[in-house]
C-alpha cells in the first residue's frame, strides 16, 4: 500500500522535471542588472524596465505558488504518517499537491516566455549560451580546484 503511494510520488516528480530543466537553461534572479550580461545582450533602458516589471510580477506569484506547494506537501506528509494509512486520501492529496506544483512550474515557464518576448529569439539564444558557458566554466573550476578540507 505504501509502496503504491511512493510510486505515485516518484512518477509525479519525473513528470514535473522537464519543465524545471528548461528553466535551468537561463540564469535566475535579476541577471539583466549584471553590467556584463546587459552589455553583451545590448539591453536598452526600456527592456530593462520591462524585465524588472515582469520579474516583480512573477516573483510575487512564485512566492504564493511556493507557499501553496508547501502547504499541500505538509498535508500529504500528515496523511502518509497516519495509521492506518488511508490510501485514497493520500492519492487525492498527492493529486492536489501535483496540481500546485504544476501551477508553480507554469509560473516559472511563463516568466521564461516573457523574457523571450522581451529579448527576441536571437538575444534569448545568446542569453542561454552565455549562461551555459558560465556554468560550464564554474564547473570546470571546481573540478580542477577541489575544495581542501
Image: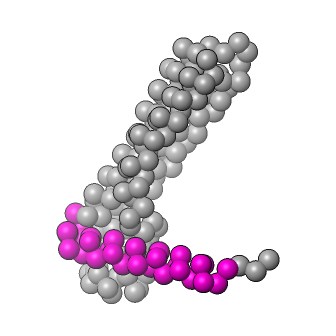
Label count reads 0
Quarter holding the N terminus? top right
Residue 56 visible in the snapshot:
no
**Residue 132, picture quadrant:** bottom left
Name the spot of residue 119 as percent of width and height, x first: 24, 71
Q: Residue at x 44, y 47 (%)?
A: 17
In the foreground, 132 or 60:
132
Q: Say left or right for 54 vs 120.
A: right
* Residue in the image at 47% along x and 26% along y: 95
Where does residue 24 sit, x and y in percent of width and height?
Answer: 42, 61
Instruction: Locate the C terminus and report the quarter of the image it occupies.
Output: bottom right
Say above or below: 55 vs 125: above
Q: Is 144 on the left-hand or right-hand side of 121?
A: right
Kindly give the residue lying farthest to the left in the view shown: 121
Q: Give the residues drawn in magenta, as a range.
A: 117-146
Q: Is residue 50 magenta?
A: no
Amino acid at each position: 500500500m505504501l509502496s503504491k503511494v511512493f510510486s505515485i510520488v516518484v512518477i509525479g516528480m519525473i513528470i514535473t522535471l522537464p519543465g524545471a530543466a528548461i528553466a535551468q537553461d537561463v540564469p535566475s534572479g535579476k541577471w539583466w542588472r549584471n553590467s556584463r550580461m546587459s552589455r553583451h545582450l545590448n539591453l536598452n533602458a526600456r527592456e530593462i524596465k520591462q524585465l524588472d516589471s515582469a520579474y516583480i510580477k512573477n516573483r510575487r506569484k512564485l512566492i504564493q505558488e511556493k507557499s501553496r506547494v508547501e502547504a499541500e506537501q505538509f498535508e500529504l506528509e500528515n496523511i502518509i504518517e497516519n495509521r492506518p494509512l488511508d490510501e485514497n486520501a493520500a492519492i487525492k492529496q498527492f493529486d492536489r499537491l501535483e496540481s500546485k506544483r504544476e501551477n508553480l512550474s507554469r509560473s516559472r515557464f511563463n516568466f521564461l516566455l516573457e523574457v523571450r518576448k522581451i529579448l527576441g529569439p536571437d538575444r534569448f539564444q545568446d542569453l542561454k549560451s552565455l549562461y551555459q558557458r558560465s556554468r560550464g566554466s564554474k564547473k570546470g573550476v571546481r573540478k580542477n580546484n577541489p575544495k581542501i578540507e
